[in-house]
Image: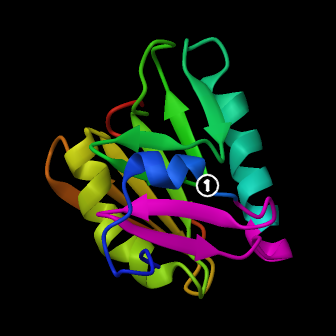
Amino acid sequence: MRTAENKAVTLEMFTAMPKDEHKKYELIDGIIYMAPSPSREHQRIAHKLHGKLYTTLDQTGCDAAGELDIVCQGNVLRPDLMVFCNRDDEIPEIVFEILSPSTRHRDLGIKLVKYEQMGVKEYWIVDPKTKAITVHNFVAQHAETYILGEIAKSEIRP
């Protein structure tokens, strides 16, 4: 979605615009993307993953958060989950996206590029359709896919 004159939307315009609280809005390269509320399956996966992260990160100094805006380089992205290991950081170390039909193409394409450009160290893509998790390690410049039954691991935060 662009402005009526087909001009790029600025961060200021995006911040000022009214938003439906039941939808997820992101601003990427001057274009507003909107997604409906997540499905029950999507929410179930997010809650389970958040619980696992909470348990795993306990006593490490890192925190898991969900549905927060990451504002960087004029873009606003809202991952499903993220991990911060420094309270002052605005960019998380690890980002998690759970694929859904309305966001799949964007999560696998432009957001992969944007997260790396923002300085995210790992990008985890959870695919409910294939029951797989792909971990993109931007520091080491490689990706690993884990299938159902395997334990997905972070290389930057063992």
Q: Is residue 47 above or below residue 119?
A: below
Q: Nearer the viewer, residue 116 or 77?
A: 77
**Amino acid type of the residue tagged 1 in the rendering:** Asp
Question: At 32% from the left edge and 41% from the top edge, which residue is drawn?
Answer: 120
Q: Residue at x 36, y 63 (%)?
A: 28
Q: Is residue 70 left or right of residue 102?
A: left
Give the magenta-colored segment's residue range.
19-42
> At 72% from the left edge and 67% from the top edge, which residue is drawn?
23
- The correct choice, above or below, for 17 with respect to 109 in the image is above
Q: Is residue 109 above or below residue 142?
A: below
Q: Is residue 152 visible?
A: no
Q: Residue 98: image x %, image y %?
A: 59, 67
Residue 115 image position (x, y, % from top left):
32, 51
SS for callout 1: loop
Q: Which residue corresponds to mark 1?
A: 80
Name the image quarter holding the C terminus: top left
**Considering only vertical position in the picture, is 31 above or below 77?**
below
Q: In the picture provided, is 30 more to the left or to the right than 69?
A: left
Q: Is residue 118 left or right of residue 97?
A: left
